[in-house]
Image (cartoon, rainbow, N blue to C red):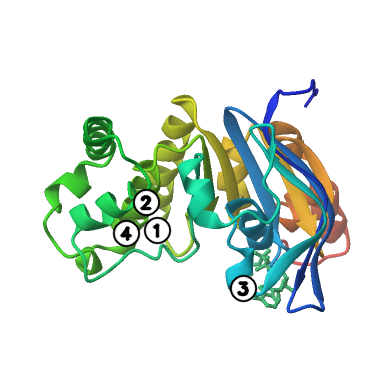
């Protein structure tokens, strides 16, 4: 990415995050998200992906975490340490890992909760109409309890609820987790359309194949640091990424194994 001042909607500069006063979860993390497009954040369990999202969405405090160094800038303003509710009205929405819909409430009530910071009734109704157009299943189940939806439908509801806030920046934490491949493909198409509508998307995924097939740009986190970054296609071709995250081993390795008589793969 080439940078000129003001080009990015969100930046993290040299950010450290500490949990409980002693656990250093992020170390000098720097990343940039342009005003539109998809940025992927990849890494193994515990690498710090969710912590990056929490440091952007203002949810660190809930987890006894704090940015102890560096700065988070959104839309030109320093938002380091700003509480989550204030950020929703400024256009940052997060879909948390595990979906976290309200199972006892109806689909409609869940969607309405996504618009809780808005005071533009007519406009909110239009957003509801466009969310239901994007997710016809939510229209079908509008008055039913959300807890009765399947895992994939709950993920659609979680994304739809976030879209009710009319975000400029959508943070998605592992939207493909635990879903069947056909549903993952549907979610991927939805994310693409959301990005094409002009929303900046930050996508945290363990499914590197899905994330890198969508991402314009990606960051790989290791041990709380950015270990590698590059365009989506470049990362997909990177031999280390292919081996560690995509499970693809180079032809050379296969030949060596064949020569040594090992079974392959
Ligand atoms: P996963 O893919 O498993 O969700 P992740 O890459 O999202 O992992 P984080 O959840 O951000 O990683 O965790 C980064 C580090 O911070 C880990 O060492 C984790 O144990 C630690 N951590 C996360 N949340 C807390 C917390 N509330 N209190 C203390 N340590 C935490």
State the CA–CA distance, disc 3 to disc 1: 30 Å
When the figure is inspected, residue 133 is found, relative to residue 249, above or below; the finding is above
Q: CA distance from mark 2 to mark 3?
A: 31 Å
* In the foreground, 146 or 17: 17
| The CB of the residue at mark 3 lies under 8 Å from ligand 1 | yes
Dots 2 and 1: beta carbons under 8 Å?
yes
Element under disc 2 = helix
Q: Nearer the viewer, mark 4 or mark 3?
A: 3
Indicate the secondary structure of the residue bearing disc 1: loop
Left or right: 208 in relation to 227: left
Q: Is mark 2 within 8 Å of ligand 1?
A: no
SS under mark 3: helix
Query: How many residues crowd mark 2 within 10 Å: few (<14), some (14–19), many (20+)?
Result: some
**Mark 4, mark 1: which one is toward the viewer?**
4
- The residue at 31%/53% (across/down) is 157
Looking at the image, can residue 174 be seen? no
Residue that mark 3 sits on: 63
Of 28 and 252, nearer the camera is: 28
Residue 11 drawn at (x, y percent):
73, 39
Identify the residue position indicated by label 2 in the image. 183
């Amino acid at each position: 990415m080439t940078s000129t001042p003001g080009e990015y909607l969100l930046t993290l500069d040299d950010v450290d995050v500490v949990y409980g006063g002693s656990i250093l979860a992020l170390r000098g993390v720097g990343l940039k998200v342009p005003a539109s497009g998809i940025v992927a954040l990849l890494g193994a369990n515990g690498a710090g992906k969710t912590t990056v999202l929490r440091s952007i969405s203002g949810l660190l405090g809930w987890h006894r975490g704090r940015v102890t160094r560096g700065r988070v800038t959104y839309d030109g303003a320093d938002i380091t340490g700003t509480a989550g509710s204030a950020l929703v009205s400024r256009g940052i929405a997060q879909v948390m890992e595990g979906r976290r819909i309200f199972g006892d409430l109806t689909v409609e009530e869940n969607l309405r909760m996504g618009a809780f910071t808005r005071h533009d009734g007519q406009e909110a109704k239009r957003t509801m109409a466009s969310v239901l157009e994007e997710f016809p299943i939510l229209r079908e189940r509008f008055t039913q309890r959300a807890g009765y939806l399947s895992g994939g439908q709950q993920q659609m509801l979680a994304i739809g609820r976030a879209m009710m806030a009319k975000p400029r920046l959508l943070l998605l934490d592992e939207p493909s987790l635990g879903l069947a491949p056909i549903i993952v493909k549907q979610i991927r198409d939805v994310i693409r359309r959301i990005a094409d509508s002009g929303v900046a998307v930050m996508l945290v995924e363990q499914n590197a194949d899905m994330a890198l097939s969508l991402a314009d740009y990606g960051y790989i986190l290791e041990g709380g640091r950015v270990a590698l970054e590059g365009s989506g296609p470049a990362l997909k071709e990177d031999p280390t990424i292919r081996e560690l995250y995509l499970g693809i081993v180079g032809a050379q390795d296969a030949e060596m194994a064949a020569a040594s008589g090992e079974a392959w793969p």
